[in-house]
Amino acid sequence: MTIIRILPHQEYCPTGASVQVPVGTSICEALIENGIALEHACEMSCACTTCHVIVREGFASLGEMEETEEDLLDRAWGLEPNSRLACQAIVAKTDLVIEIPRYSINHAKEKH
């Protein structure tokens, strides 16, 4: 099991959180399964950037980015060198610290 520590985010987890997930799980799945309702407008199909996260620790442990993810990330708000789409970033054995950016390009959110 790998631990993902989520830094505080005003909307998604105001006090921050720490979740334990199995290796091979995407960051997006891990957060959603643990009650953190990260946006994922394309239903995790790598077609948008609403699940953009910044990996503050453990970035190198994530698998290589495919070209589609790289192209989409160019449109993400608050892009940083250690940004990933949470739906594409698969957890390995290294613990992670992630930050959910304050904004996304999704101007109209649906409450699921």
Image (tube, rainbow, N blue to C red):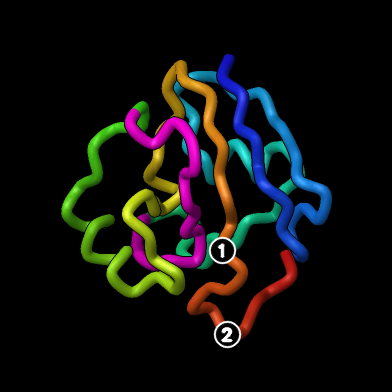
> Which residue is at the front of the view, 67 or 99?
99
* Image coordinates for residue 76, horizontal then vertical, percent: 39, 70
Of pointers 1 and 2, the one earlier in the residue sequence: 1
Picture layout, residue 70 above or below residue 29: below
Graded by Cα atoms within 10 Å as few (under 14), some (14 to 19) or many (20 or more), the crowding at tag 2 reads: few
* Image coordinates for residue 44, horizontal then vertical, percent: 45, 53
Q: Quadrant of the N terminus?
A: top right
- Label 1 vs label 2, nearer the camera: 1
Q: Which mark is residue 107?
A: 2
> Which residue is at the front of the view, 86 or 78?
78
Local secondary structure at mark 2? loop
What residue appears at the point 44 percent right and 73 percent down from the top-left corner?
A: 77
The residue that label 1 is drawn on is 101
In the image, the segment drawn in magenta is 46-60
Q: Residue furthest bottom?
A: 107
Picture layout, residue 49 above or below residue 12: below
> Which residue is at the front of the view, 16 or 19?
16
Question: Magenta includes 40?
Answer: no
What residue appears at the point 23 percent right and 37 percent down from the top-left corner?
A: 64
> In which image quadrant can residue 107 be found?
bottom right
Mark 1 is on which residue type?
Answer: Pro
